[in-house]
Image (cartoon, helix red, strand yellow):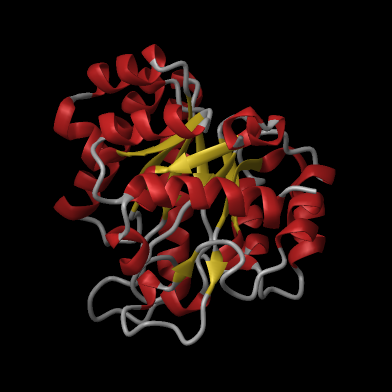
Amino acid sequence: MINQDPRLARLSLNQKTVNRCSVAEAVQGCTEVGIPAIGLWREPVHEIGVAKTAKLVDDAGLRVSSLCRGGFFTGVEGAERRGAMADNRRALDEAAELGAPCLVLVVGGLPAGSRDLPGARQRVVDALAELAPYAGERGVRLALEPLHPMYCADRAVLSTLGQALEIAEAFPVEQVGVVVDAFHVWWDPELFTQIGRAADRIASFQVCDWLTPLPADVLLGRGMMGDGHIDFRPLRAAVERAGYRGDIEVEIFNADVWAEEPHTVLHTMAERYLGCVCD
């Protein structure tokens, strides 16, 4: 049976993969299928409260692999930017209470009407300089997630692992790390070189597949492992050679997956993880 396979010991369900599930439903699904960890999203956590979420996860014997998400640092000075910084401090507090080792950061795209990409990237650096010491105090690592270049304008002005590392390396390793998300970085000809450079900067490793054709809403173009074009085993091996021994999260944004029965999704996820990601 799947839930008796020791190779599942590092598997984590990113909650977005079962998008219509509450925290309680996602936790229950993990326990039924034998998935030992969960990556939580702030919005469903807020629906029941951080303390109740922490108790649900702990009572189920699960661990939290990450909290999604913080970031959105690229706004110009003013109320919006001040609000984003305050929200990131709250997110760090929540991550600490949940026992999450990292807060995943989607850094933000260009402000409305702006074409100043260097300026937006500098504001990411400035935000990290302000938040990194607080993250260190809370015992939570800020995890920069580079997103595929098609999201540069509206979601993340960091597009490659190399760019993320260039910023992260200016800060203590226990305060700022990076996310290696297969969907976003698999195409990069410098990927394996940058993973080797990353070493102990890797705070999270996420997997899902790249589908073609992409849907009209490219945010939903993530597929179940084995349904697309990514070769996961070399990527996993490279991350492990770099020293990463943490959980491997499956994070899927896909309307068809979200419409499926969640228990079926979790069983398929575990089977594909064994068949496509593990040796």
Q: In which quadrant of the rendered view does residue 116 lie?
A: bottom left
User: Where is 262 relative to 181, above or below?
Assistant: above
Image point 32% across, 85% down: which residue? 216
User: Where is 117 relative to 214, above or below?
Assistant: above
Image point 62% across, 63% down: which residue? 163
Question: Residue 253 in the image: x percent, y percent?
Answer: 38, 62
Question: Residue 264 in the image: x percent, y percent?
Answer: 40, 50
Image point 40% across, 17% down: which residue? 60
One can see residue 167 in this view:
no
Labels in figure, total: 0
Which residue is more in the foreground, 256 or 116? 256
- Judge from the rendering whether residue 249 lies leftward or rightward of residue 54; answer left or right: right
Which residue is more in the foreground, 182 or 159? 182
One can see residue 230 in this view:
yes
Question: Residue 5 in the image: x percent, y percent?
Answer: 68, 32
- Judge from the rendering whether residue 98 lies leftward or rightward of residue 212; answer left or right: left
**Where is the N terminus found, in terms of image quarters?**
top right
Which residue is more in the foreground, 13 or 198? 13
Image point 80% across, 48% down: which residue? 279
Question: Residue 233 in the image: x percent, y percent?
Answer: 76, 57
